[in-house]
Image (cartoon, helix red, strand yellow):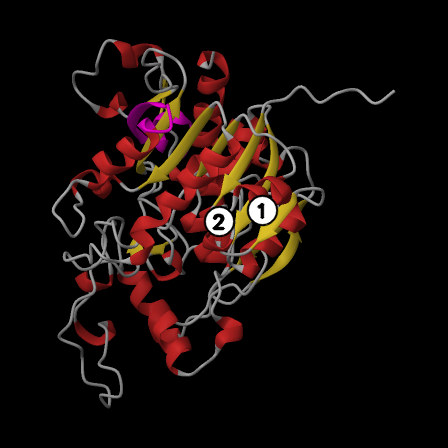
Amino acid sequence: MIKADKRLKVVDLFAGAGGFGLGFELAGLKISASLELDSWACDTLKYNHPHLNVLEGDIRDFNSCETVKRVVGVKPDIIIGGPPCQGFSVAGPAQKDPKDPRNSLFINFAQWANFLEPKAVVMENVLGLLSRQNAEGKKVINIIKRVFSDLGYFMEVWALNAAEYGVPQNRERLFIIGHHNEREIGPPPPTHTLDATKLQPSFESQFLEPALHLWDAISDLPVLEAGEGTEEQKYSVEAETKFQQWARNEGDNLFNHVAMEHSKRLVERFKLIRWGESSSDITGEFAARKRSGNGILSEIKYDQNNRRLYPYKPSHTIAAAFYANFLHPFQHRNLTAREGARVQSFPDSYRFLGKKTVVSQKLLQREARIDEKHLCQYNQIGNAVPPLLARAIALHLKENLS
């Protein structure tokens, strides 16, 4: 007799490579279906979850109750997801387009909630969403809350830092929660504290573990020079921290640990960059040159390029295109995809498919290279909700949902 699966069922929308869903799985819930538009991210989902119902397509094409129920196949307890946030993000140009069609994708999320009637919904976005307005000057966060309130959900908004939940990274994100409880459940209690270096830490922080540092996460990974590494390899040293032991999970294989190709001149520049500095701090012979400028030094400073990470602090936020953002704290190269995945709290067995990197989306569009217009490994990793942060949210919901 087949035993019934009594785990709470979850549908993951805008799933990307599956970090949000993985966290809910780590908390003991079951991901019943994942919807994702990008084919390379879908390849990653299918590889890591061979039995998962992966729906590859645009959420806007699933717009009838009958269709949604048919493709999902189950009645979920929770719907999770992070609608694309490019129109809301505080990164990049200060002026965002309030008419950006990506800003309204939460409506499609709400439509699925209306069709499937889950006990709870969880939406992830950037903190900048709190200050964004639509074309009529109305605050977007209030519009989102009203839409879900009209569906009968009690709404909460949590601003969480992943570093306070065992992720070795300072990463602040917004979570919009809807549930049917009649009272506020509040955010999950932190398990780690960033107060360790403060002269007067808070009373509560004295009972928490210190936030993990970058070196706690990646110190055991094989040493690589520029251009070295393979998509699959063995570990070269033993795990050195509890986090590393957790990431390995007694496995033997390490995926996606391949260093970027760098010119000799660029490596020489990297050698001059100290912790906390970036390429913009370098002057003289190894400073950046103008493109096609016959060796003339560039006057433009890119402060976000090639910043050397501090080893003994939580990492900076890993962004969607982090392959040129950060330098390894000791090795003279950019971070590998696997190092970024460790910082995001993905286990080492989680393999990312698709190309390692791609050129800019604008260039691909201009050159009609549609077959490459997908989320590369670095994009998939940087876009993800850190699994250990998602796990903390899932455990909290399991405990508090009526």
Q: Is residue 126 above or below residue 206?
A: below
Q: Amino acid at mark 2?
A: Asn
Residue appearing at x 68%, y 33% in the figure: 250
Q: Amino acid at mark 1?
A: Thr
Of residues 184 and 112, the one nearer the viewer is 112
Residue 32, percent across and down? 62, 35
Of residues 220 and 87, the one nearer the viewer is 87
Name which quarter of the figure residue 71 lies in: top right
Inspect the magenta stretch and tell me whether residue 156 lies in it: yes
Residue 269, percent across and down? 29, 67
Region in magenta:
149-168
**Callout 2 secondary element:** loop
Residue 79, percent across and down? 49, 33
| Residue identifier under label 1 | 67
Of residues 202 and 108, the one nearer the viewer is 108
Q: Is residue 106 above or below residue 116?
A: below
The N terminus appears in which quarter of the rendering?
top right
Task: Note whether residue 170 is visible.
Answer: yes
> In the rendered picture of this protein, how many numbered marks are placed on residues?
2
Q: Is residue 307 left or right of residue 97?
A: right
Inspect the magenta stretch and tell me whether residue 255 lies in it: no
| Residue identifier under label 2 | 63
Q: Residue furthest right?
A: 1
Residue appearing at x 54%, y 64% in the figure: 228
Crowdedness near tag 1: few (<14), some (14–19) or many (≥20) residues, C-alpha within 10 Å: few
**Callout 1 secondary element:** helix
For the residues bearing labels 2 and 1, Cβ distance under 8 angstroms: yes
